[in-house]
Amino acid sequence: MAEAGDENLYAAARDIARALGKDPSAAGDILQILSGYGATGNTSSNSRASTASRGDANLNRSLNSLERQISSYIVEDRPIWSDPVDSRSFLDAVDDLLAMAGDLRSMAGDKSVATCLSRADELIQQVMFRLQEEFGYVMDRASETFDSDDEFSGEEDNDIGYDQVIVARPVTDYKIVIEPLQSSVIGDLNAIAVRMVAGGFGKECSRVYSSRRREFLEESLSRLHLRGLSMEEVQDSPWQDLEDEIDRWIKAVTMVFRVFFPSERLLCDRVFSDLPVSSVTDLSFMEVCRGTTTQLLNFADAIALGSRLPERLFKVMDLYEALEDLIPKMETLFSNKYCSPLKHEAVAIQKRLGEAVRGIFMELENLIRRDPPKTAFPGGGIHPITRYVMNYLRAACKSRQSLEQILDHTGNDAGSETRPLSVQLIWVLELLESNLEGKKRTYRDPPLCFLFMMNNGKYILDKATDNELGSILGEDWIVKHAAKLRQYHSNFLRSSWNQVVALLRTESPYSKLIENLKLFKARFDEVCLMQSQWVVTDEQLREELRSSIAGIVSPAYSSFVGRLKASPEINGRRGEPFIPYTVEDLELRIKGLFKER
């Protein structure tokens, strides 16, 4: 009963301190006053010593009582938090122990107080180790019955048990927040966290929390079917496999930064609420996110540092744009000092992806330069390099905004070459035209050279008309290229059909007219036979060429036949001279020129 009275006396001293507006640490002084209350007014040294002795004894008895109470829980084999009553009583005892330690520190200087403080600190350390175990137990109990088929529905389910972990299923709007722990669990974790931080074990609490939440994230990430490739594995994987992995990566990184991490931040804030400092919360959140963030960013970095083959442009752009969309979210999530290195790394990797895009364009230029003339392309049709480059540029321009950002506003480091997007595209097209000029020389027949340039020029112009590519190239480029196309058309007619028609433009004697008619027929037949095998893929161009040829040949032939029939030398002869074709016959033959492919 004496010990209980002393404990009550100590508790009363703390209550009086609070009531007087003083710090509870003043309880020690008040206890000494209460212990000596009722003594005589004699202020002799013997009286003061007696009062101090009684105060020390009361402190020892209170500490002994707390030690017995707390030790009974610490030595238990079963978890304290398996019984709500035990956990509440244990926390009350821990609160009293921490308060007593604070009081003892305020009474520093006395040897007996120092002894009590040393004992209290040792007991606090034992308590913290047990709280650390209990914190892990509460988190483990919340996940040990986890069903791998459980999915988050986005709606509250009152039937969810205390020990269920909810994992997100695939979503598309990314406007949900996962609540993986019940409020009661969060309340227990918060209660433990507050005591551990007060006892100087904030980092240890953070470590336990982070390790358990990382496991949750790893499990959730595995459901998104990422292979978790290392940098070396990425470099060694076939590009087709990596294309599929990039698609999965984009879905995963979007889910992580728009659903998982915001949910983890909210959970962190709730578990570590009511703490005097936010560093434990921020540190815990960083430790939870760091591994997943690093894994995701390492994959993007490996792609950025990989091959610069032109075929990789579009998936590299997908990665760049995915990070571009998510970096503002990272700015919010990773705003504290612990997380900011993760944000800076994401920005740096996005920049390296931009550098990869510039490198890919350089490799595209090299690919065009290295494509050799070899043998003449059959029929003068559209060369594969033309189709490849134009379709490539059109597809690339669907990401115009990102390309402009990369090519116009990055690459300003010393020694790097930067071209705005429009300049870059015009330069690529100039290289393409130069390459085609080289290929043109492989044709022995000059008209076929011009037909080849016309076919490819028309394809280039069509691919750059009424779309994003043409908008970037600008109206001036379109007008100049159309003028080149007309020139090719004119050169084709001049080098081919003008020479045929020249045989009909003669005022020679009748005998010469008859000879030229024979020459015209032979030449016309020869050219028709040859050009009927030439290729003009574009229907509009095909009709324009036939119309232009007919426009030259038909009037000249009609005029020639008229002159031949009106020749004075024909008078007195029997019948008319042999005319091999009518104008309609010629036009029918001309309509058979050029095949589609």
Image: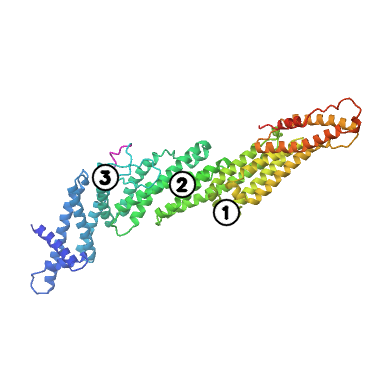
The residues colored magenta run 143-148
Disc 2 to disc 3, C-alpha distance: 32 Å
Visible residue check, residue 309? no
Query: Marks 2 and 1, Cα distance to the nearest angstrom?
Result: 25 Å
Residue at the spot 37% in from the left edge and 50% down from the top edge: 262
Q: Which residue is mark 2?
A: 297
Residue 460, image x, y percentages: 64, 42
Say left or right for 531 vs 294. right
According to the image, label 3 marks what residue?
Answer: 137
| Amino acid type of the residue that numbered disc 1 sits on in the rendered structure | Asp
In the image, residue 259 lies at what x, y percent? 38, 47
Residue type at mark 3: give it: Tyr
Q: Earlier in the sequence, mark 2 or mark 3?
A: 3
Q: Give the quarter of the image for residue 505.
A: top right
Number of marks drawn = 3
355 sits to left or right of 145:
right
As shown in the figure, which amino acid type bears the numbered disc 2? Leu
Binning the other alpha carbons within 10 Å of mark 2 as few (below 14), some (14 to 19) or many (20 upward) gives many
